[in-house]
Amino acid sequence: MTEFLSALVSQPFLQMSLLAGLLASLGCGVIGTFVVVKRITFLAGGIAHSVLAGMGAAVYFGFDPLLGALIAAIVSALLIGWIRLNWKTQEDTLIGAIWAMGMAVGLLFIAQTPGYTSSLTSYLFGNILLVPEQDVWFMGILDLVLLLIVGLFYRQFLAVIFDEEFARLRGVPVSFFYLLLLCLIAVTVVLLIHVVGLILVIALLTLPAAIAGHYVHSLGWMMLIATVLGSSFTIGGLAISYSPDLPAGPTIILLAGSAYVISAIFSHYRLKRRARQSLSMPS
Amino acid sequence: MIELQNVSFSYGLVPVLQQINFSVEEGEFLGIVGPNAGGKSTLLKLILGLIKPQTGTVSVLGKKPTQQRTQIGYVPQYPGFARDFPITVEQAVLLGRLGSGRQFGRYNAADYQAVQDALNELEAQDLAQRPISALSGGQLQRILLARALVSEPKILILDEPTANIDMRIESDIFDHLRELNKRLTILVVSHDIAFISDYVSRVACLNRTLVCHTTDALDGHLIQHLYGEPVRRVAHVH
């Protein structure tokens, strides 16, 4: 741990990693809360995994993989959203198909790119220690866009997430905001790629918000706590993995996963105890 | 206020409503009754503009239903949200203000005032800061009603508002509706014809694919025809 702290002071690359982790945590705290409460983890998973198609294409054609990821994420978000809105009967099968086909396309592109196969694992599992400075800037801009859109349309998002039919009756363009929400999820997925890689994105997107949901009863608090938790997991995972030279992504995920399991058990028993107490109290 | 002309609707091959003509006048308290699966909820969805009839026209305040949604307050049979959604009563009711007032950013003082007034009117002001997961069935029903009222609608539409709560709270809710009827036109769907006959000013019967009469002349004989039992006799006194 002390090695990590002294390295953090002396090594600019580690500071970049930390900054990237914090920027990603902000996105996943805010959007992850929407995903958890709306129960669309599967949709988010579909978006996350089909992103590989865009990254593969970017590598093959020689442009920035993060830009490729963003484009692919938005396209698959719109496609998945369109399926969800118009094709409900086969929704899960179709999303599963997009999920797998996106990955397949990405793998084919990467296989056809000479000399690039080594970078595959860093897309799949992340490599937070090697985040280029320009990508950190890019992540910062994505965070800003995300917060701006959520800030402006918070009520509409809440309405759509809470009760779609009622939102429609109040004149909220539900389909538009639903698709916009999926696009924001797409942006968040891109934010998380460097940190944990796209295979593990779903965990960091949903676990901090799910833990927060055990304890608070408003979306705002969930977002705040999820952001703080996400940051802690990222920094903690980074610190734990640094000295023994473990991959940071899986360490972060295991940390988040363990915290989630402990929290789930704790809140389960807390609920039971409260139920008992409410019975023993004179009403 | 509401007018349906020759309206027919079917889900797939199953006709749910056939050739429906009826209108609702201002200030009415109209009950729509009929057996389960008689098309009552479908009729409401047509009036709300959530679905379109295959034939015929629906108009609300002289326009298409989709253009008049802000004039209608709607209380669904089942809440369209998860009961464990992390939201307070106040925030949930505030969502009823969407569509009236400004669209960007935060709620303003008028929005909060409207919520306060609606909760006061329904004697639910104490519940404002509670999470909705902590509400009983009867309390939830009042909150749904409050959410429908905060947009200051001209018409109130309720789908089985008391299907899941006990008798005492049921009459409580209907007492509130009677009070609201002084300023609102109310349309309420129920399968419990006996109960609502104490409150409504007119009853329309809907059964399966066919519409029973919806005229002012509707009386016990028609309902008797529909249900096969004399209904006036069932109209109970507590």
Image: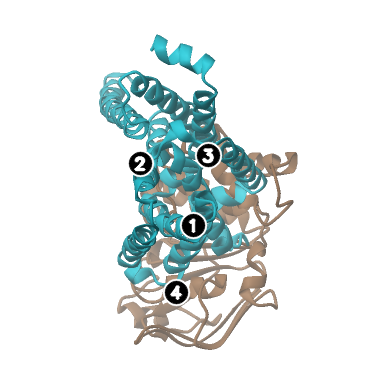
Chain colours: A cyan, B brown
Q: What percent of the width, then of the height, locates residue B107? A: 69, 42
Sequence-earlier tag: 2 or 3? 3
- 10 Å neighbourhood of mark 4: few (<14), some, or many (≥20)? some
Same chain for marks 1 and 3? yes
The chain containing the residue under callout 1 comes to A
Residue indicated by mark 3: A27
Foreground tag (1 vs 3): 1
- Residue B203 vs A30, above or below: the answer is below
| Residue that extends furthest to the front in the rendered view of this protein | A115
- Work out whether residue B218 or residue A163 is closer to the camera in this orientation and state it: A163
- The kind of secondary structure element at disc 3 is helix
**Which chain does the numbered disc 4 sit on?**
B
Whether the residues at callouts 2 and 1 have beta carbons within 8 Å, the answer is no
Residue beneath the point at 36% across and 84% down? B12
SS assignment at label 1: helix
Residue that mark 1 sits on: A58
Instruction: Say if labels 4 and 3 share a chain.
Output: no
Amino acid marked by disc 3: Gly
**Is residue A35 placed above or below A97 in the rendered structure?**
above
Identify residue type, mark 1. Answer: Ala
| Cα distance between the residues tagged 2 and 4 | 50 Å
How far apart are labels 4 and 3 at the CA level? 41 Å
Q: Which subunit holds the residue at mark 3? A: A
Subunit of label 2: A
